[in-house]
Image (spheres, grey):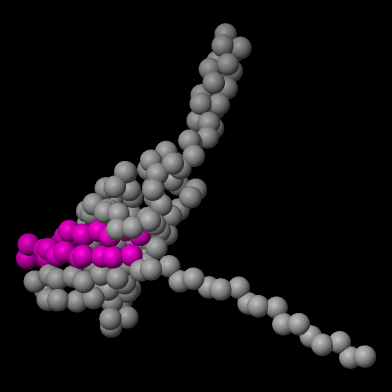
Amino acid sequence: MVKILLSAALMAVVSVAQAKPAFTGINFSGIYDCKGSNELVGNYQVTIKLKLNRISSYGKFGAYDFSTETDNAVTYRGQAVANGNRLALSYKMSDGKYAEYTTGIAEMKKLSRGRWSFSNLYYEPDDSGGNYGKEDCVMQFASVIKPATKLKLKQKS
């Protein structure tokens, strides 16, 4: 009886310890320039950064660290998850005792090789029905950094 219980316990541990499949989804990491609008703020611009969390991503499921900074240096931080081209976002802005939570949903669209865009439809709850908004975001072009050229030094004779 003890052997049966030990075998069952060992099988449970082995099944939990199995590795997740490797991440095979699309990596949407990058910096995005966004133009948005909502009833509370009106029109605005923000910069969004998405960074793939490789440890938590597997198969077609991508987990991302998310941050956005407004023109007046207010920062929101949170997470995003992707399944295929669908992206869900959850983030929070804190300012002292005040905290604002936002939930968004987006569909990623390919612009060119390695470049993406998305429209984020979001909701921010409050005591009077909440605030709804939309952001249209376009991934910035990657900066190409050329390697430094080696200087040839003249040898003194």
Q: Name the residue rendered at 14%, 76% in the picture.
A: 43
Q: Magenta part mainly helix, strand or loop?
A: strand
Question: Which residues are drawn in magenta?
Answer: 115-139
Residue 15: image x %, image y %? Answer: 51, 26
- At 43% from the left edge and 45% from the top edge, which residue is drawn? 57
Q: Quadrant of the N terminus?
A: top right
Above or below for 86 versus 103? above
Judged left or right of residue 17, residue 111 is left
Seen in the picture, residue 4 relative to 50 is either above or below; the reply is: above
Residue projecting furthest to the bottom: 156
Which of these two is toward me, 45 or 7? 45
As drawn, which residue projects farthest toward the top? 1
Q: Would residue 20 appear left or right of 41 to someone viewing this image?
A: right
- Figure quadrant of residue 68: bottom left
Which corner quadrant holds the C terminus?
bottom right
Seen in the picture, residue 94 relative to 120 is either above or below; the reply is below
Residue ID at (55%, 26%): 14
Residue 52 point in image, percent of width and height: 43, 55
Q: Is residue 84 magenta?
A: no
Looking at the image, which is closer to me, 73 or 33? Answer: 33
| Viewer-closest of 134 and 75 | 134
Residue at 70%, 78% in the rendered image? 150
Give the residue at the far right of this rendering: 157
Q: Nearer the viewer, residue 8 or 14?
A: 14
User: In the displayed image of the protein, which residue is found farthest to the left?
Assistant: 128
Report the side of 130 relative to 65 (left or right). Answer: left
> Does residue 95 appear in this view?
no
Spot occupied by residue 53 in the image (x, y as percentages of width and height): 45, 53
Q: Is residue 156 left or right of residue 122?
A: right
Query: Quadrant of residue 115 in the image?
Result: bottom left
Query: Is residue 144 in view?
Result: yes
| Residue 106 position in % (x across, y down) | 23, 54
